[in-house]
Image: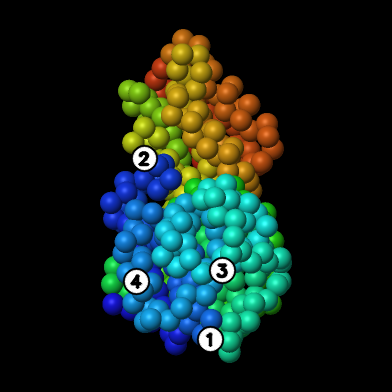
Amino acid sequence: MKKEIKKDLFYLGVNDRIKHKFEALWPLPYGVSYNSYLLRDEKNVLFDTVDSDYSGLFFRNLKEALEGRKLDYLVINHMEPDHSGSISLLKTYYPEVQIVGNARTIDMLNGYYGITEGLVCVKDCDELPIGKRVLKFFLTPMIHWPETMMTYEPTGKMLFSGDAFGCFGSLDGGITDAQLNVGKYWNEMIRYYSNIVGKYGNPVQKALCRLAGLEVNVICSTHGPVWTEEENITKVISIYDRLSKCEGENGVVIAYGSMYGHTEYVAETLAYELSQQGVKNIILHNVSFTDSSYIIRDIFKYKGLIIGSPTYNNQLFPKVESLLSQIQGRDVKNKYFSYFGTFTWAGAAVKRLAAFTESGCFEVVGEPVEMKQGMFESVEENIRLLAKSMAEKIK
Ligand code: FEO
């Protein structure tokens, strides 16, 4: 069945509700879609393919949308295998197709699939006439690989954006935001951005500046709904803009490890005191139970971050250490940061958390709280002071 999004533009994508983890790392509670599109004109152009697990369905979609026409071009906006996985088979089924990409794409095509012929190499701002329409290419490296680019079609004001503006979540029936209840996608967009693209805030900012002059009526990304409603297009772009600048909403994430509940009690007390100070968005994550992708999502989403850990083998609790490493790997910045630690006979957690702040990416707020063994009035008072300092910054 062919799925026409608007005149001459067809959706060929597939839904993956089988994979447990995207990139073998990130849980997919709502699945994920791999989007591909066909634009019909005097020349017929395919934009990206899909994961090889879904090639069969994809080629059926392509054949139905072509309705016997020739496939002239494949434009590759992104080479990661969830989008390039069906290219080898495409060359087998459509040997005359010309593959359009930039120099880095072409290098990867050879490296991954041994394809060296039938290529059209484009540079930034190059144009390709396809009949009544013209395609214009914008190189947008590191969103999210070095070869990534976007393709703009000015007549329909369509932007084929690659991973940018994408999100987790399968497309259940509808394809466009006008056909779907999009509520479930917003938090999944933040989780997708923060975990997959989050390291590349500066390239995202550069790309957004370049796109600022373009009128866009349709965003065709490689994951999630096709965005067509003006208010959603504005919202999607503003989410990417805000997150890439690490601008958070009012709120505090408290991420903690706890073996026997003592460190958790500090976290709970801190949360209560923050609430007494008028902070309403307080998100507690026990690092042993919440998948780190949700913690990273919320760290990007909110302004305040407090991390707590017991001392474990004279180090941090391992799951807290792992979270710190993930934060560092994503270049998170512009957060208000506080920390606390607990110990039984020799405290190391607070020292290690203090060392974490030395990168200077965060503004340290208040005095860290350290608790030996159990809760005493003096510790409670320190928690109260820390909560007050953080609340003042957040508000
Ligand atoms: Fe959806 Fe970077 O691949």
Q: The residue tagged with tag 4: helix, strand or loop?
A: helix
Mark 3 or mark 2: which comes first in sequence?
3
Q: Nearer the viewer, residue 76 or 99?
A: 99
Please report contact status of discs 4 and 2: CB closer than 8 Å, yes or no. Answer: no
Inspect the image, locate mark 4, and give the three-letter code of the amino acid beneath it.
Answer: Asn
Q: The residue tagged with tag 2: helix, strand or loop?
A: loop
Residue at which label 1 appears? 42
Q: The residue tagged with tag 1: helix, strand or loop?
A: loop
Residue at which label 2 appears? 290
Please report contact status of discs 3 and 1: CB closer than 8 Å, yes or no. Answer: no
Residue at which label 3 appears? 98
Is ligand 1 within 8 Å of the beta carbon of the residue shown at mark 3? Answer: no
Nearer to us of marks 3 and 2 is 3
Inspect the image, locate mark 2, and give the three-letter code of the amino acid beneath it.
Answer: Thr
Q: The residue tagged with tag 3: helix, strand or loop?
A: strand
Which disc, if any, is residue 61? 4
Inspect the image, locate mark 3, and give the three-letter code of the amino acid beneath it.
Answer: Gln
- x 43%, y 29%: residue: 319
Cα distance between the residues tagged 2 and 1: 51 Å
Cα distance between the residues tagged 4 and 3: 19 Å
Local crowd at mark 1 within 10 Å, few (<14), some, or many (≥20)?
Answer: some
Inspect the image, locate mark 1, and give the three-letter code of the amino acid beneath it.
Answer: Glu
336 vs 126, left or right, is left
